[in-house]
Amino acid sequence: MTLPYSLAGKVAIVTGGSKGIGTSIVHHLAALGAKVVIASRKIEACQVVVAEVEAKGGEALAVACNISKKEDCMALVQAAKDKWGRVDIFVANAAVNPVYGPLAELEDSAFEKVMTSNVHSLLWFAKAAMPLMAEQGGGSFIVVSSIGGLRGSPTLGAYGISKTADLGVVRSLAVEWGPKNITVNCIMPGLVKTDFARALWENPEVSADRIKRTPVRRIGEPDDIGGIAAFLAGPWSRFITGEVIVADGGTTIVGP
């Protein structure tokens, strides 16, 4: 095996790939030689990242995908197959968080939206992508979750529930598809400087408090997560499946 390892000849799909953690994952995979399908609801934003990848000599494709719609999820995988004939790596990074408040005030429609987008979409993507991986001898399915799935919250309960459910999906898929040489793993980031979490890290009081309670004394950057996804996508992690990598600078290990 060469150092660093290569993903040349591999085809990857990254949802939520047009910004933040998703864009970092795209660039890490492309730098290792993978062809990358970049998906989000706004194809124009995806095309910007495609141009960035191509400017560095890589290959990429932009596809619009709303993860709350089954037909979009299935079509995304088909687009990768139509373009490059295979799928080796799937990174389910996109998620929604439209609700802020206690569970006692949670509307059914809002909860259904969160669970459909953040959990049910994983099953759709797996159903579409994993048979293709199996046909070619294996692959890697990666879910980007959140430490919100490990903790309770008085205001982000619905989101946290969906992120806890991610773990169940990962473990069951890992057992089901392991015999086909497909690994399934989960990354749980802590607070990272992305648009998704901007309301938290741009708040001076919240940011200062989080940094004070984080052993490495900083907030995460998208590249802190991109490298982990690249590791899980490649051959060095081929004996790891059904596992969770918490990347939060140590936040969740700190006692009261």
Image: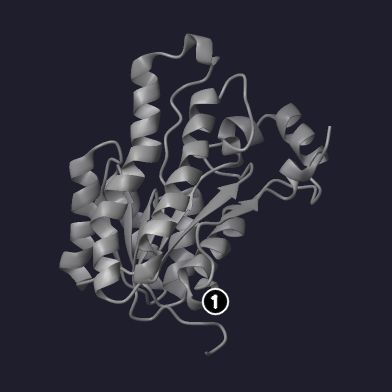
| Residue at the (27%, 76%) spot, across then down | 136
209 lies above or below 55: above
Whether residue 93 is visible to the viewer of this picture, yes or no, is no
Tell me the quarter of the picture where residue 154 sits.
top right
- The residue depicted at 20 percent of the width and 66 percent of the height is 81
> Is 2 situated left or right of 202 in this image?
left
Say which quarter of the image contains residue 191.
top right
Tally of marks: 1
Q: Is residue 51 above or below residue 168?
A: below
What x and y, as percent, mark residue 68?
Answer: 29, 36
Position in image of residue 53 (x %, y %): 39, 67
For the residue pair 180 and 72, the one nearer the viewer reads as: 180
Structural crowding at the residue carrying mark 1, measured as other residues with C-alpha within 10 Å and reported as few (<14), some (14–19) or many (≥20): few
Q: Position of residue 114 (x, y in %)?
A: 40, 29
Q: Residue at x 46, y 30 (%)?
A: 97
- Looking at the rendered structure, the kind of residue marked 1 is Trp
Q: Is residue 202 left or right of residue 133?
A: right
In the image shown, does 125 or 10 lie closer to the viewer?
Answer: 125
Q: Residue 107: x, y in percent?
A: 40, 13
Task: Give the residue at mark 1.
Answer: 236
Question: Tag 1, which secondary structure?
Answer: helix
* 179 or 118, nearer to the observer: 179
